Amino acid sequence: MVLKSPVFQAVWAVCAGVTAFGVPCDGSEKVSTGDVRTDSVLVEVQKKLRAVRTCRAQVVTVLRMMGQQVAVRDTAAYKVPARMRLEKVLPGGIREVTVSTGSIMWTYDSEEQMAVRINLVRIYRATGREADVYQPDPTRPFRGLAWKTIRAVGTEPAGADTLYVFEAVPQVNLLQAELQIMLTKVRFSVHPADGLLRFVRFYDASGEEVLSHRFEEVALNPDLDNSLFEFVIPANVGVLDKTDDVIKLLKAAGGDLKTGVEQ
């Protein structure tokens, strides 16, 4: 597939998920953030997350670059730990399916007849980074963050609900590496009843919002068949393994992009 506009090339990098996947990490093994109030709210949220087994949601992802805005909607299913299925329609009506077992991620483009494979475990072992931390996953709200920078900053209304709001510095990830941008802050909202994400917003060094995820129609613990998270390569489909490419890109980005926070 060829996307000529720079904006749509960026959308492909962000939303298609062709090269961007990682391993599960929810921060539950972490120690104190250094802020008593934040630690108290984190403990409360993590207690709620222990009851989460599965989740369904509609996810609206918005990318803002070069004065333009592009939105993509996913029909998403998640199963703890780290299994995920995203069915999306990209710009131009291109349909794509991403399936993760938690250790291997597949992305299938039916128009291109191409399946891309990423070994999540190899990437993490080689780089110490979760390549997919900007991918929408409501069941893992605290992954990919510089832990000591996480702060509970208040609450915000969402319809009839009131959400916990956090801010933190994101660790270097594949989005930054591919687009050569520096994300300096993430602001995210979590529902106190289930611990699941409802909103995530990433900001650049100028304070402009670059990427956001909004989780709608969230269903907690629906029955999900394991077959949803299995990928069978269709007949006559090409297979491309991009694990090594991702490792090289993330290693290079570690020295090129700095947030000013020790990772």
Image (spheres, rainbow, N blue to C red):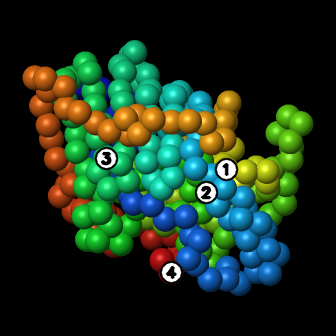
* Image spot of residue 196 (x, y percent): 67, 50
* Residues marked 1 and 4 touching at CB (< 8 Å): no
Quarter location, residue 219 = top right
Secondary structure beneath disc 3? strand
Secondary structure under badge 2? loop
Q: CA distance from mark 4 to mark 3?
A: 29 Å
**Residue drawn 56% across the image and 76% down it:** 29
Which of the two labelled residues, at mark 1 and mark 4, occupies the earlier sequence position? 1
**Amino acid type, callout 2:** Pro
What residue would you read off at disc 1? 196
User: Label 1 sits on what residue type?
Assistant: Leu
Q: Please name the residue shown 25% across and 50% down the image.
A: 118
* Marks 1 & 2, CB-CB < 8 Å contact: yes
> Of residues 129 and 25, which is closer to you in this image?
25
- Kindly state the secondary structure of the residue where label 1 is placed: loop
Q: Is residue 14 visible?
A: yes
Amino acid type at circle 3 is: Met
Identify which residue is drawn at 82% across, 39% down: 158
Residue 209 visible at all? no
Residue 141: image tag:
2
Place residue 164 in its image quadrant: bottom right
Relative to residue 1, is residue 153 depicted above or below? below
Q: Which amino acid lies under the numbered mark 4 shown in the image of this protein?
A: Glu
